[in-house]
Amino acid sequence: MIEWIILGAVILVILGFIAYLVSVYNRFMKLKNAAEASLNQIKVGLQKRMDLLAELVEATKSYVNYERSVLESVTKLRTEVYAAATPEKITEAERESRALLGRILAVAENYPDLKASEVVTNLMNSAKSVEDEIARLRYTYNNVVQEYNTMIDMFPSNMIASFMGLRKLPYLEVPREAEQRPRLTF
């Protein structure tokens, strides 16, 4: 009889341990998938920014002779955003698109008639909304990555992560010039 009780207790401990391993593994996968989803949402936000840039270029080019390079930059950045698969590449696309947006907004600031244009005003309002969305998505991604990386660092989940070959995820770095949002004044 005692043997059966001991055997039952051992089986319960083993099943409990297996359940714990499964729950930790599932938590890692949930966080990893959430990070990937957030990164893809950031790419969508950057694509929205590229679309707005293209529209702002079109809306403002009648006031200023844009260099061909500005239009080519928008096209190149659109392609890079689609291809961006890592936080580093997304950070670079973010930096370049932010700089380009800043240049276009500077042109709009220098032409009062242009600033008064309903089309440009609507596009600038949309740009502000997209900037807010990208900032929120970047925050969400980094929070998920922080939780994932913390699990990798903490005992006993670090042993499970090591056994499964899980590595820390990189944070989405914000370029220094991106710490200040482009001015969207009217």
Image (cartoon, rainbow, N blue to C red):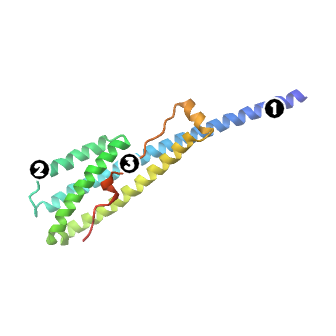
Q: Left or right? Give the position of 21 relative to 1.
A: left
> Can you give x and y, in whole percent of width and height, for residue 153 in the image?
56, 40
How many other residues sit within 10 Å of disc 3, few (<14), some (14-19) or many (≥20)? some
Q: Which mark is residue 173?
A: 3
Residue at the limit of the structure toward the front, as seen here: 176
Instruction: Please tell me which residue is depicted at 48% across the width and 42% down the height of the picture.
Output: 33
Real-space CA distance between mark 1 and mark 3, rounded to the nearest whole angstrom: 51 Å
Question: Which one is closest to the eye, mark 3 or mark 2?
Answer: 3
> Can you give x and y, in whole percent of width and height, for residue 158 in the image?
58, 37
Q: Which mark is residue 177?
A: none
Q: Amino acid at mark 1?
A: Gly
Q: Earlier in the sequence, mark 1 or mark 2?
A: 1
Q: Quadrant of residue 19?
A: top right
Q: Earlier in the sequence, mark 1 or mark 3?
A: 1
Q: Are marks 3 and 2 in contact (CB under 8 Å)?
A: no
Residue at the limit of the structure toward the right, as seen here: 1
Q: Secondary structure at mark 1?
A: helix
> Can you give x and y, in whole percent of width and height, for residue 105 in the image?
21, 62
Residue named by callout 2: 68
Residue named by callout 1: 8
Q: Amino acid at mark 3?
A: Glu
